[in-house]
């Protein structure tokens, strides 16, 4: 195993996992959702808003407000701020930046929040105004949004590596069974592989149950020094390692791997653990094909073995490879940038033993990942983190 | 393989006409390099002047070396279709009502990967040939064609959205008295137009080619004097709802400039016929065409102007005529913008002096009327909007791109 030269995240911890339960459509603003998440953080930590001196926020629907405008909205007086527009990779990036800020003493308690509303027209608006390359070269093809882009990626992956729809279906079905244990999941009905297979096509080979449901919601956590957490009596998790990579493998004519593949060795080297040591994995699951790619790129199997890996494992909470234990975005819903936080916040709950009905038994060390920004033909941003609970 | 499209039946008068919708129109400024390419039927990509890398989508610095020297240049068209998908539930209205719609990812032999519309005969993993087309929004999109032309190629549903193919469409040719007009009628009939209405002013006056014109099946001679607002309005009241393509073949050519002419009567005539005639036609036929941009197989599709290339640079020997053509060119850009919401193209066909009586004293090369007719049909089939016919027009185009001042001095010499 290679060794890492990066500074470990010593004496920095995460605490207070927060989820503001999702709704399909909301007439409230993004600010309403972010405000609720901040309130839950403050209440959960037993602090006041004045104790928060670092603020990191992500939202697609906050309109003209970036982090700075939100400080005045919420009465925060901070000495460190970041607004992270990295879509599905926002939570990993937020964690990395906040942890270094705390470690360097630039902030004492950082609130990391993602919140989005979902008005009836929000999603289409976000699609239409996503990026310049998307505007110029994707949206005019009827392909706004990720469905078509991932259809092209999925179809190529299936043809190249022999993945079948059933394999993607197994991921989705396992997540639904996990979601049935999560009271906050928007999907409440069981999903069978037969239902998955016979769902209506959206953009071949993507069918209905390959897609996330856009919704409104918010997710958050705090990053602080170990000593601060102790003084507040807060159960806290350590950050063993993180990676982040953008626009990797630009020469691949179509995406078959994400940036993780470039940095995965360092991830495990820095954490001092092997893939086998992980008690659960929370991948970024905007589509099952991306989760399957991550099984390869995050070192659980080799490139092209994703389909086989899925066939050989039980991906449910009590299975041989507990994966997306909350139900993931596929079954909980995708609350805009909150989707990036879903897996990270669930991982935090798992290692703290606070996951309640979705708790993996004896979960001590787990991985959460992020992926995002379909700027043109592929997802550009990727990241991952390995967290450890107090007993690890 | 494509099934040939069927001739549309007579429209049910009780049925509502579907209003045209547009694909997304917004583009970055750099991206209009593709609009320019598509307008002329060229396939151009940005290529770095420093390192030679081809880039896509349009950008402002080279992705390999960051050089800002990224000129649009004609690029090799070949690529491989890596992956395809059929959109069943697209997010925007335009594509949703056209679903299922097929798009793909093409890896170009010259480097970049293009998201593209697909001709139905493109096969995954197989070779394709790319073009840029103007879609119903008037903006450029990439389109992949099969390597070899399959049967019924132009009947492909997605391809037909990009073109104004005359097949099964109803056309108005505004002036059947001219040779150009008659050649245009014949070419459109050969191209499959279901009916061609041919305007003839003062029909009691005989003209050359009249018998042949009257004998042609699927051709209907209609009274039309485009200089007369009422005549144009009367015809529009009669057939305006079934003109899918309008070809303005008005021809009013007189030699002379400013100083050697006495008074304004000749100039006024040029303006009346060419410019105000265009205005009359646009006001009478334009609104209905714009409404009918999505009206099935024989939707309104295109408006064609035949313009002298001297609309772009005045030729003093035909100086006042050149000016009337410049006015028409300017007006065509206005019409293009106003027809765009309907997805109706405005095609400008620029020609050098035609081989007709009014250019008798001009030395060759001159453009045969049949060449103009063929260029119009070709432009409609390929979906381009700026066409240069003949050696003189092409010569002026290139010289203007190189140095407009030189053109001005040399034409005035």
Image: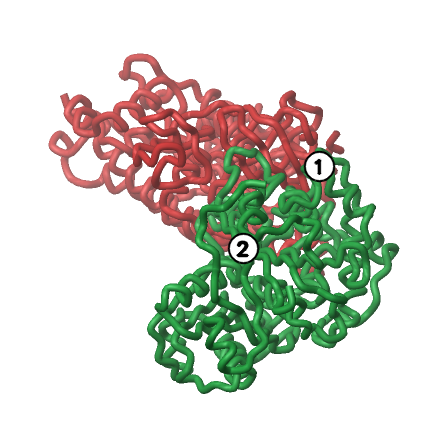
Chain colours: A green, B red
What label does residue A222 carry, if any? none
**What quarter of the picture does the C terminus of chain A occupy?**
bottom right
**What quarter of the picture does the N terminus of chain A occupy?**
top right
| Crowd rating for badge 1 (residues with CA inside 10 Å; few <14, some 14–19, many 20+) | many
Nearer the camera: disc 1 or disc 2: 2
Left or right of A171 on screen, residue B145: left
Q: Is residue B342 visible?
A: no
Whether labels 1 and 2 belong to a single chain: the reply is: yes
Alpha carbon of mark 1 to alpha carbon of mark 2: how far?
26 Å
Nearest the viewer among A278 and B287 is A278
Q: Is residue B14 visible?
A: yes
Nearest the viewer among A348 and A303 is A348
At x 52% / y 25%, what residue is drawn? B77
Vertical placement of A218 versus B385: above or below? Answer: below
At x 34% / y 46%, what residue is drawn? B331
| Crowd rating for badge 2 (residues with CA inside 10 Å; few <14, some 14–19, many 20+) | many
> Which residue is labeled 2 in the image?
A241
Quarter residue B128 falls in: top right
The x and y percentages for residue A121 are 57, 68
> Which residue is labeled 1 in the image?
A304
At x 56% / y 79%, what residue is drawn? A234
The chain under label 2 reads A
Q: Secondary structure at mark 1?
A: loop
Tell me if label 1 and label 2 are in contact, CB under 8 Å. no
Nearest the viewer among A48 and B107 is A48
Left or right of B29 on screen, residue B184: right
At x 39% / y 29%, what residue is drawn? B47
The x and y percentages for residue A4 are 49, 46
Quarter residue B51 falls in: top left
Q: Secondary structure at mark 2?
A: strand
The chain under label 1 reads A
Q: Earlier in the sequence, mark 1 or mark 2?
A: 2
């Amino acid at each position: 195993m290679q060794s890492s030269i990066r500074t470990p995240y010593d004496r920095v911890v995460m605490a207070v996992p927060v989820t503001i339960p999702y709704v399909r459509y909301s007439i409230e603003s993004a600010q309403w959702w972010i405000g609720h998440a901040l309130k839950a953080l403050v209440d959960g930590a037993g602090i006041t808003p004045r104790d928060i001196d670092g603020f990191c926020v992500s939202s697609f629907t906050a309109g003209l407000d970036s982090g700075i405008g939100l400080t005045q909205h919420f009465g925060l007086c901070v000495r460190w701020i970041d607004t992270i527009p990295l879509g599905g990779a926002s939570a990993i990036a937020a964690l990395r930046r906040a942890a270094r800020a705390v470690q360097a003493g630039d902030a004492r308690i950082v609130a990391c929040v993602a919140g989005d509303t979902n008005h009836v027209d929000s999603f289409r608006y976000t699609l239409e105004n996503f990026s310049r390359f998307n505007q110029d070269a994707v949206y005019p093809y009827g392909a706004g949004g990720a469905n078509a882009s991932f259809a092209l990626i999925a179809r190529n992956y299936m043809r190249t590596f022999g993945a079948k729809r059933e394999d993607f279906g197994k991921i989705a079905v396992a997540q639904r069974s996990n979601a049935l244990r999560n009271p906050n999941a928007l999907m409440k009905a069981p999903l069978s592989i037969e239902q998955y297979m016979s769902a209506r096509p959206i953009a071949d080979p993507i069918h209905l149950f390959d897609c996330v449901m856009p919704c409104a919601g918010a997710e958050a956590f705090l990053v602080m020094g170990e000593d601060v957490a102790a003084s507040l009596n807060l159960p806290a998790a350590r950050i063993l390692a993180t990676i982040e990579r953008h626009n990797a493998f630009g020469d691949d004519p179509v995406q078959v791997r994400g940036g993780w593949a470039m940095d995965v060795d360092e991830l495990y080297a820095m954490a001092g653990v092997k893939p086998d040591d992980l008690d659960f994995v929370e991948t970024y699951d905007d589509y099952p094909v991306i989760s399957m790619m991550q099984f390869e790129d995050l070192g659980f199997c080799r490139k092209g073995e994703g389909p086989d890996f899925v066939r050989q494992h039980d991906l449910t909470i009590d299975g041989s490879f507990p994966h997306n234990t909350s139900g993931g975005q596929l079954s909980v819903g995708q609350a805009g940038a909150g989707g990036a936080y879903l897996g990270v916040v669930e991982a935090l709950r798992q290692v703290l033993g606070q996951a309640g009905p979705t708790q993996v038994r004896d979960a001590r060390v787990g991985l959460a990942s992020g992926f995002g920004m379909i700027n043109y033909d592929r997802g550009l941003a990727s990241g991952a983190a390995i967290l450890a609970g107090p007993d690890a | 393989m494509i099934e040939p499209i069927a001739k549309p039946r007579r429209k049910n008068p009780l049925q509502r006409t579907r209003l045209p919708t547009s694909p997304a129109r917004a583009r970055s400024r750099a991206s209009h390099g593709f609009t320019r390419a598509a307008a002329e039927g060229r396939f151009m990509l940005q290529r770095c002047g420093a390192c030679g890398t081809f880039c896509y989508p349009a950008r402002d610095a080279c992705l390999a070396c960051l050089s800002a020297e990224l000129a649009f240049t004609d690029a090799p068209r070949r690529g491989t279709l890596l992956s395809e998908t059929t959109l069943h539930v697209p997010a925007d209205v335009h594509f949703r009502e056209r679903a299922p719609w097929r798009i793909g990812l093409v890896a170009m032999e010259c480097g970049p990967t293009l998201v593209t519309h697909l001709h139905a005969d493109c096969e995954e993993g197989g070779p394709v040939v790319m073009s840029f087309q103007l879609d119903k929004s008037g903006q450029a999109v990439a389109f992949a064609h099969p390597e070899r032309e399959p049967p019924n190629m132009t009947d492909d549903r997605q391809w037909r959205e990009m073109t104004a193919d005359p097949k099964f469409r109803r056309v108005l040719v505004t002036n059947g008295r001219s040779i150009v007009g008659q050649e245009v009628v014949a070419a459109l009939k050969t191209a499959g137009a279901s009916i061609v209405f041919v305007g003839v002013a003062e029909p009691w006056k005989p003209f050359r080619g009249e018998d042949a014109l009257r004998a042609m099946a699927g051709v209907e001679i209609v009274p039309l004097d485009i200089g007369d607002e009422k005549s144009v309005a009367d015809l529009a009241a009669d057939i305006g709802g079934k003109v899918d393509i309008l070809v303005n073949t008005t021809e009013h050519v007189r030699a002379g400039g400013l100083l050697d002419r006495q008074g304004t009567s000749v100039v006024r005539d040029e303006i009346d016929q060419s410019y105000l005639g265009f205005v009359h036609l646009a006001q009478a036929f334009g609104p209905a065409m714009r409404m009918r941009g999505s009206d099935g197989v024989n939707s309104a599709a295109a408006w064609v102007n035949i313009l002298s290339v001297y609309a772009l640079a005045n030729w003093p020997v035909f100086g006042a005529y050149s000016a009337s053509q410049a006015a028409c060119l300017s007006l065509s850009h206005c019409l293009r913008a106003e027809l765009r919401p309907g997805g109706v193209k405005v095609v400008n066909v620029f020609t050098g002096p035609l081989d007709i009586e009014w250019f008798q004293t001009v030395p060759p090369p001159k453009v045969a009327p049949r060449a103009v007719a063929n260029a119009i049909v070709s432009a409609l089939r390929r979906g381009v909007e700026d066409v240069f016919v003949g050696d003189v027009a092409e010569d002026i185009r290139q010289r203007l791109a190189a140095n407009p001042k030189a053109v001005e001095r040399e034409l005035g010499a």
